[in-house]
Image (tube, grey):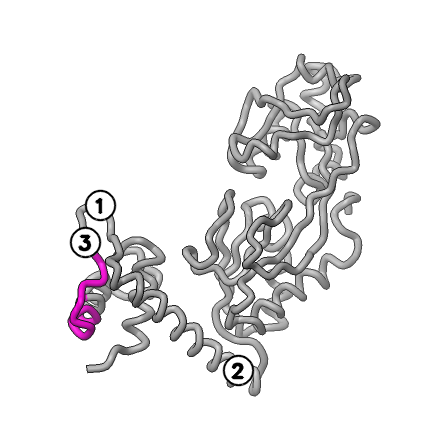
Amino acid sequence: MKTTLDEMQAFIAITATGSISAAAERLGLTVSATSRTLTRLEEKLETTLVRRTTRRLELTEEGKAFLECARGIVAKVEETEEKMSLRRQGPAGRLRIDASTPFMLHVLVPLVNGYRERYPRVELELNSHEGITDLLEKRTDVAFRIGRLRDSTLHATPIGSGRLRILASPAYLARHGTPASVADLANHTLLGFNQPESLNEWPLLDADGQPVHITPNIFTSSGETLLHLALHGAGIVCLNDFLANPDRAAGRLRQVLAAETLEVRQPINAVYYRNTALSARIASFVEHVKEKLGDRGFDEPV
């Protein structure tokens, strides 16, 4: 008996999600059906692909080898289907997009309706992660990343850049005063990230001309959480324009130490693997984002 594409897709889903139940939910199948599919696949291949324990599933060496082959086969089938679809009606199929929660909510979500009107045959799967994700492990087709890129195996398309500013709510400044110098920050509650530490380097210079690296009094993994903490008057924060501009424009946040703030911009890129088989879907979404954002960037409140 020959291995089927459905069996390969089920195996890929199991390895991607880490459990049979999660894979079943992703595939729209029952847990028992997904488990039977894995068992049937192993019987056909006459080998054990996955070791099952009470807590997790672990790939055997044979499973790792088969996973690599299965991914290539499924990707090639998707590429062929997409080419045939493009000949008829344009991009189609599922596009899995990953971004940090703030960028997803404040930049991408408002653009989804317009994209779907242009490309109704593309199914969007939107996922948010605060850290850097492995595109293959998370089955991500395109990710939007903020800051300097490190993975040279990824293809990057620049989307724009956003400036960093030091901000606080009017309520916080009314209670605690407005810092008049960089040194005054020592007397204030500072909001920052628990990881990576590089995000706690603010666009300021200390008395010795060195970059200011703050030690937060309140810290979190999410820029979205930092935004809401600042809006509720919890302290002073450093945020990217794409996240803070609407609240700055509405007066809910005020820039502090504006004269001392350096022109530091974080690049924003769409990234995906160079050998991806989903270029039409990716290109359509990335171009839509670039077109809607235009040349204005994120510098000024709109």
| Place of residue 210 in the rendered image (x, y in percent of width and height, measured from the top left) | 73, 24
Measured in 3D between alpha carbons, the distance from the residue under mark 1 to the one under mark 2, in whole angstroms, is 41 Å
Q: Residue at x 24, y 58 (%)?
A: 60
Measured in 3D between alpha carbons, the distance from the residue under mark 2 to the one under mark 3, in whole angstroms, is 38 Å
Is residue 15 part of the magenta span, yes or no?
Answer: no
Q: Which mark, by number, is residue 83?
A: 2
Is residue 43 part of the magenta span, yes or no?
Answer: yes
The residue wearing badge 3 is 52
Task: Tally the numbered discs.
Answer: 3
Q: Residue at x 67, y 36 (%)?
A: 239
Q: Earlier in the sequence, mark 1 or mark 2?
A: 1
Task: Pick out the residue farthest to the top.
Answer: 187
Using the image as rendered, state which of residue 110 and residue 182 is in the foreground. 182
Using the image as rendered, state which of residue 253 and residue 150 is in the foreground. 150
Q: Is residue 13 above or below residue 224?
A: below
Using the image as rendered, state which of residue 37 and residue 73 is in the foreground. 73
| Place of residue 120 in the rendered image (x, y in percent of width and height, measured from the top left) | 56, 73
The residue wearing badge 1 is 55
What amino acid is labelled 2 in the image?
Answer: Lys
| Place of residue 185 in the rendered image (x, y in percent of width and height, measured from the top left) | 69, 17
What amino acid is labelled 3 in the image?
Answer: Arg
The answer to whether residue 28 is seen in the rendering is no
Circle 2: element type:
helix
Q: In the image, which residues are magenta?
A: 39-50
Q: Residue at x 77, y 17 (%)?
A: 207
Q: Residues within 10 Å of mark 1 (few under 14, many from 20)?
A: few
The answer to whether residue 8 is seen in the rendering is yes
Circle 1: element type:
loop
Measured in 3D between alpha carbons, the distance from the residue under mark 1 to the one under mark 3, in whole angstroms, is 8 Å
Q: Residues within 10 Å of mark 3 (few under 14, many from 20)?
A: few
